[in-house]
Image (tube, coloured by chain):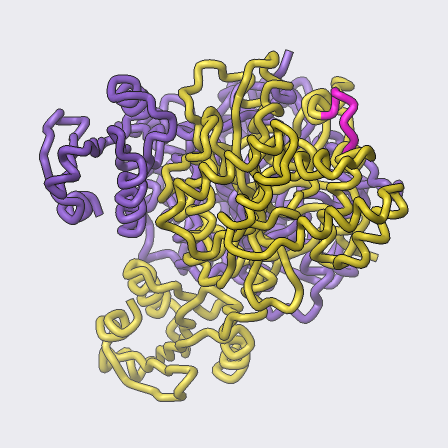
Chain colours: A purple, B yellow
Amino acid sequence: MIETAKGVRDFPAEETIIRNEMMNKIITVFENYGFSPLETPTIERFSTLSAKFAAGDESDALKETFTFTDQGERKLGLRFDLTVPLSRFIAMNPTLKMPFKRYEIGKVFRDGPIKLGRYREFVQCDVDIIGCKTMRAEAELLLLALDVFKELDIDAYVEVNNRKLLSGILDTVGITQSHESVITILDKMSKIGLAGVESELYNLGVAKEKTKQLTDIFDMRGDRHKILDGLKKIMTTDAGKQGIAELEELFSILKDFKDNIKLNISLARGLSYYTGTVFEGFIKNNKIKSSICGGGRYDNMIGLFAGNKEFPAVGISFGLEPITEFMKLTKLKINKTVTEIFIVPINTFQESLKIAQQLRKAGVNTEIDLLDKGVSKNLSYVNSLDIPHVLFIGEEELKKEKVKLRNMKTGKEELLTVELVIERLA
Amino acid sequence: MIETAKGVRDFPAEETIIRNEMMNKIITVFENYGFSPLETPTIERFSTLSAKFAAGDESDALKETFTFTDQGERKLGLRFDLTVPLSRFIAMNPTLKMPFKRYEIGKVFRDGPIKLGRYREFVQCDVDIIGCKTMRAEAELLLLALDVFKELDIDAYVEVNNRKLLSGILDTVGITQSHESVITILDKMSKIGLAGVESELYNLGVAKEKTKQLTDIFDMRGDRHKILDGLKKIMTTDAGKQGIAELEELFSILKDFKDNIKLNISLARGLSYYTGTVFEGFIKNNKIKSSICGGGRYDNMIGLFAGNKEFPAVGISFGLEPITEFMKLTKLKINKTVTEIFIVPINTFQESLKIAQQLRKAGVNTEIDLLDKGVSKNLSYVNSLDIPHVLFIGEEELKKEKVKLRNMKTGKEELLTVELVIERLA
């Protein structure tokens, strides 16, 4: 049986058209914010892909890396994100001017279990600022995310938090278990709810009273300033205080842009390499709380590749798949083809081809019958693809220097000159 | 040492900007001809990738396939072209309406030797028509190729031949050696010249007089009709006669479009799966005869995947790499960034960010200093990236509701309202 590999997909025209449309809109906003494109290879040396985990850091990503060797027996792998290739690129190009602002849209690969919405090959749209220590970088990326939502016409918002704040809360409460594990559990808050988080923390050995303290903190209500003020009063660690200060700095920069930016002090984000701010974007009023972008500050990662030199970095990644899935649900019309007009020559192929070339030259996406199928079969082809216009070109019409344009939506037919057809469609 | 894998490359902004520009122009023409996009996965089952060679067909492509297994021990590989995934897609979707016209632009992978201009990961831009037996498909693709050249502003032409004609010539001359091997040698004509071809044929065991006969035929001069008439007189096989008839049919359809379409009866194209027409596009007046596209008819291949059902098919593939390399040599200005204006706030970050957002909203690609670098370091950053405009925003200017725009090319500075800056740049 012929089939695709497990966890990968074909995207027929009706899906690729939307994907490309979304991608182009995302690119427009990325460039609008002065991010230039970088293209890194799909294949990396395995040593590069694993460098990130040299410090004994736990992660599924490496376990899920597709690995192979080339004919020279070099160990290679498929990239599992766009951040590692970016870090490798920066390490290899020490003369890059800072800040280095780049975007990359590309496929990444994970040899993991297949679940709903999880694939082994998917597209990430990443935008990163390297070389900026201050919260200005975060501010830029948050504004950019909001403009991406606007450009995509998606009603969405971004939740913001800070890892230092989160660690500070855990230390303040006196959590002695691995912060990593506790954060991973807290990260599931939106999926498994408070009760689920409580039960998993209990299994990890966190005393019930500490869980109560934690959930009380995470339950704080009010605007972002009130919450941060409340945290200031209880925070006992320097890191925690710094986390609060960073969030205050960020909100101060963004004081004129408050809409759709929400503080969520329990937001953790799974990846362990984040060092400060984290953010995640969600579609509003969606039945499931589905994430369409996420990111944060990762000040230590590039140094792993670049001889421990310090490279402050903040990035955000948009998932093309969740965005496209959402658009497919909400879009009124899904195009099955890019074709705007289909020409049916009636014993006039030669002349019709010339007219096709005129239409194409005028920028009208034009198909011409290649199979001499006859009118009714051609119309069934046109209907199956929802092509909006048909042009019938018969000998009689040509004698009068006219062609017959049919609007497939209204059914209306008109005898027109080619020039007028172009005027209508171009 | 940190490095990329062998034979793959990073494309920094100045290269990716050109690549994307070329790609978008190619897509515009593909869609203009009514081809819709298809996106197939990078990873395929190994059984799919090797199906093409089940018939014992020799090819480097499979030997050069990157192969690996997933966690479920399924044997997989990276696609080495876009034709195999297309064939697999057609086999899996038996209800597709014919003709099926699709384009796909994507990365393909070959674990082969690295030579100048040969990489292990590169982009192909493929356009194919499935389901059309007649030369109308070829005619469409040739016209499309010429329009791609025009859109890219490359002075190029396409050489056309027919495999049946080529085989017919070999049979007529009485070549008993493998046609495959002889055609492979003939295919090198443009690279190693007549003498080289003669010598390699001799080594293969082709008698000198037969080589003389062959080269005499391939030396025929004159317009395409004269050459085909000449071949008709000597051709002894039915296949050869059919090849001539097909070329005549093609040239008859294209009689109104003669420019830049050349008959080259020695053109072979390396790939063994071509069954009829073959074509290859070359840049004119280029020092090296460099191919920028190629393709042909492959009527038997999809059937290998689709239960031997007949699927006539013609395709053409444009190489993004040779096109981009050529553009880099000829383009007057290589953009290093997409940024159109860089804002230097002078103790006015908050207000400057608002102005940045106004400019961005008006569609101007805008960067703002995130590092508080001061004027001279910012200007050195701007110069290093050739950003065309700088906007200085100081407190004094803001009081007057003005900002200072500097044109980096002319050095001219003007004190303007933000509205006027937008008017100038948008």
Residue range in magenta is B53-59
Q: Along the line of sight, which residue is nearer the eye, B98 or A18?
A: B98
**Compared with residue B62, is residue B374 higher up or lower down, i.e. above or below?**
below
Q: Position of residue A169 (x, y in %)?
A: 58, 40
Q: Along the line of sight, which residue is nearer the eye, A402 or A151?
A: A402
- Left or right of residue A309: residue A7: left
Figure label count: 0
Q: Residue at 42% across / 30% down in the picture?
A: A13
Q: Position of residue B412 (x, y in %)?
A: 35, 88
Residue B56 on the magenta segment: yes
- Left or right of residue A236: residue A244: left
Q: Residue at 71% across / 47% down in the picture?
A: B187
Q: Position of residue A224 (x, y in %)?
A: 39, 45
Q: Along the line of sight, which residue is nearer the eye, B121 or B100?
A: B100
Q: Extreme front residue here?
A: B233
Q: Quadrant of the C terminus of chain B?
A: bottom left
Q: Quadrant of the N terminus of chain B?
A: bottom right
Q: Position of residue A338 (x, y in %)?
A: 34, 36
**Compared with residue B131, is residue B183 higher up or lower down, i.e. above or below?**
below
Residue A25 on the magenta segment: no
